Amino acid sequence: MSRIAYVNGRYLPLRDAAVHVEDRGYQFADSVYEVCEVRDGQLIDERRHLDRLERSLGELRIRMPMARAALSVVLHEVVARNRIGYGTVYLQIGRGVARRDHAFPPLQTPPSLVVTARPLNRARNEASAEKGIAVISLPDNRWGRVDIKTTGLLPNVLARQAAIEQGARDAWFVDRDGFVTEAASANAFIVTAHGTLVTRQVDHGILRGITRTVTFEAIKAQGLALEERAFKLEEAYKAREAFVTSASQIVLPVVTINGRTIGDGKPGPVAMALRREFHRFAEAG
Ligand code: PLP
């Protein structure tokens, strides 16, 4: 079965789905995106993802291409047409097509919208979670507004590639003061020796992960202590557990950082319990 994408008003086979060469998303990364988990054919936390989308668009003064309810219909339609049971749905909205010029195009320029969906291998994801992943750290060289979910992801791309070339799976960015910000495409957490969960506070230096927010609810329900504050690598090396959160991986244990073993080198009980419990707190629809 060929995959189907939605591109500016049309559902097309992926091989025919293309954007204009003067699409500002392509030329300037003048676009934002969202990725939602799809589970049992349902979108997970769509409401929160669309809230964050509207915030990202608002910060960049890009218009919604259609009403929110209509966008929801397109997302569900792409999931259905691709018969996704377990996977992700991706949406990208850009400032539209215009003759190349850095300044904004005329206000009436229609924003562009692309939606794709793909299946994920559930067994493979579970196997990675049971094994845990290795991460490396790298200086955070991204722009100062990574709270806006733009497609300007080159530093993230280079960080993931560096991780893979060093035999790791992901990279944790470290700011100029030595504090961990987040992973290349996930939020970073540690569990201290006292059992307190720590993740960086929301500011312009991290993306407000939807999975991060929903994981907070699972943490509270388990009566665990949570601190939203910055932490350094030295603290992470001494942590009992570490993990990352994102819509496509949910809660994924980290077992080494820069080659140093975290805890006993196996996925910890806190991370695994949060992974199991997560969907009790997420919205499905
Ligand atoms: N941080 C970054 C840089 C990301 O790219 C992502 C997800 O793509 C996240 C955090 C996690 O966000 P969410 O839980 O909404 O997927």
Image: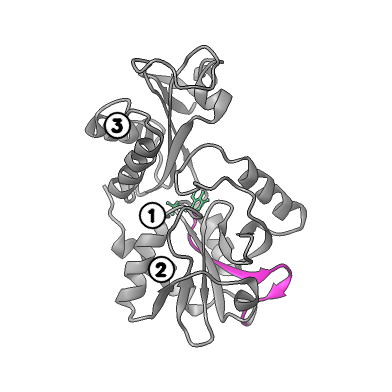
Bin the neighbour count of mark 2 within 10 Å (Cα to Cα): few under 14, some 14-19, many 20 and up.
Answer: few
Q: Measuring 51% from the left and 55% from the top, which residue is drawn there?
A: 205
- Magenta stretch: includes residue 74: no
**In the image, 245: left or right of 262?**
left
Q: Is the residue 99 above or below the residue 137 in the image?
A: above
Whether ligand 1 has any atom under 8 Å from the Cβ at mark 1 is answered as: yes
> Mark 3 or mark 2, which has the lower sequence index?
3
Residue to which mark 1 is pinned: 210
- Magenta stretch: includes residue 259: yes
Mark 1, secondary structure of its residue: helix
**Residue type at mark 2?**
Arg
Q: CA distance from mark 3 to mark 1?
A: 19 Å
Q: CA distance from mark 1 to mark 2?
A: 17 Å
Q: Measuring 34% from the left and 42% from the top, which residue is drawn there?
A: 55
Numbered badge on residue 276: 2
Q: Position of residue 42 (x, y in %)?
A: 32, 46
Residue to which mark 3 is pinned: 71
Q: Position of residue 91 (x, y in %)?
A: 42, 35
